[in-house]
Image (cartoon, grey):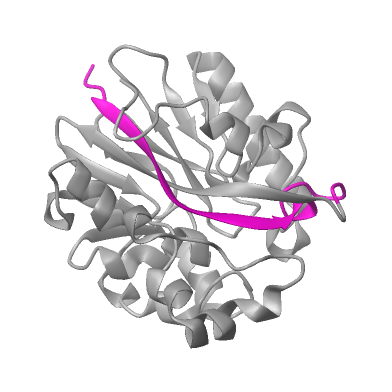
Amino acid sequence: MTRALRLWPLLTGTQRYEKAVSTRGRGQGQFIDAPILAYLIETPNGRILYDVGCDYSKLATPALRAHHFDAMRPRFEPPLMTPEQRIPSHLGRLGLTVKDIDVVFIGHLHFDHAGGLCEVPGCEVHVQRDELDAARSGADGGVVVDDLADAGDWRVMEGEYAVCSGVQAIATPGHTAGHMSLFIELPKGPPVILCGDAADLEENLVEEVAPGYCWQDNESLALASIRRMKALAVAERAELWPNHDFDFFRRQPRFPEWRD
């Protein structure tokens, strides 16, 4: 069976917010710092990016920063991002460029996961139809409209599928309408399930707590996705990687090191 070769967690920025954003019904008034992550997956058939972080220009330009993020305060502080945390900078440290990326797989279209699409022009972008429809509807407040500017060029997918041999797209709706996670088989270690924002924190998984924001307030759908990922992890002896948990992230290989 063909497996992926290497997996790199990429720290694309940090954010500070009220913990209740990640844990529904708990953590009010408690603020946490969280990583904004993307992942680079190398396979025998090419390279995949899972998510791309924020749009650096919206954070580095004071007027744009204020326009897009001031309204989120005090519950959510504007993200912090250095030039070295941009996707092209990470790729450059590995001797790669954007042209070396074969697929950009967007787990969901919130600004801290899809904003960096402007940094990967010309790449094949995969997104779920339900996710794109919800984003275009204007009903998902985590979406920045101009992040959808090139959506007409994206590959709009429906349901689960093999992204390539050893990398499977897993439907985990609830946080957003068409949220997707990735199941990755590796040559040496156990498989990895990139949860995306279906599980921000280990707490979401261990205690089965839904994200603070659920699409159309559907907590039961979000919990079903958490339970499905946990069952898959047991069945496949896989690791579950939450997406915004600094304690978990610090236990992973520090870039440019990788998992294999």
Residue drawn where x is 52% and y is 45% of the image: 196
Asked whether, in this view, residue 134 is left or right of residue 106, the answer is right
Q: Is 61 rendered above or below residue 59?
A: below
Quarter of the image with the N terminus is top left
Instruction: Establish if 81 lies above or below 66.
Output: above
Q: Residue at x 77, y 39 (%)?
A: 209
Find the magenta span and give its range.
Answer: 1-27
Quadrant where the C terminus is found in the figure:
top left
Instruction: From the top left corner, tell me how far across and down residue 43 is, in percent.
Output: 21, 32
Q: Position of residue 112 (x, y in %)?
A: 50, 61
Q: Position of residue 92 (x, y in %)?
A: 18, 49
Q: Position of 223 compared to 89: left or right?
A: right
User: Which residue is depicted at the point 43% across and 63% down?
Assistant: 114
Q: Pick the residue in front: 233 or 27.
A: 27
Q: Position of residue 98 (x, y in %)?
A: 18, 56
Q: Nearer the viewer, residue 215 or 71?
A: 71
Q: Is 255 part of what is drawn in magenta?
A: no
> Is residue 186 shown above or below 198?
above
Q: How many marks?
A: 0
Residue 13 magenta-highlighted: yes
Residue lying at 36% horizontally and 41% vertically, measured from the top left? 161
Observer-nearest of 66 and 236 = 66
In the rendered image, which quarter is residue 39 located in? top left
Q: Nearer the viewer, residue 245 or 62?
A: 62
Residue 2 in the figure: left or right of residue 161:
left
